[in-house]
Image (cartoon, grey):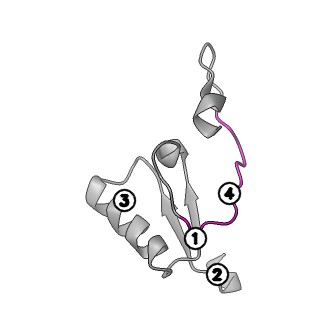
Amino acid sequence: MDKLGKSCSILTGNLNKQERDKVIQEFERGQSKVLITTNILARGYDEKKVNLIINFDIPMKPGKNEIDEFT
């Protein structure tokens, strides 16, 4: 996406809290136009500037319904 001129950030559980906070701040300030994330933001994130969310691959684990995290 960067090659297409779209500033893009990635947020995963592999980042420490300080790194995650930095990524979210950059996205909220508009420094990054696209945020690609795991289900780490499935609960409790509300950003009014977001106008499109795409759930590319909803995680499914045997015996656990993770779809509820995305509704």
Q: In which quarter of the image is the N terminus?
A: bottom right
At x 71%, y 43%, the residue is 57
Amino acid type, callout 4: Ile
The image quarter containing residue 25 is bottom left
Element at badge 4? loop
> Which is nearer the N-term, disc 2 or disc 4?
2
Inspect the image, locate mark 2, and give the three-letter code of the amino acid beneath it. Answer: Lys
Quarter of the image with the C terminus is top right
Residue 16, image x and y in percent? 30, 53
| Amino acid type, residue under disc 3 in the picture | Arg
Magenta stretch, residue numbers: 48-59
Extreme-bottom residue of the structure: 5
How far is disc 2 from disc 4 in space, using C-alphas?
16 Å
| Mark 3 or mark 4: whose residue is earlier in sequence | 3
Lateral position of residue 20 relative to residue 65, left or right? left
Residue beneath disc 1: 49
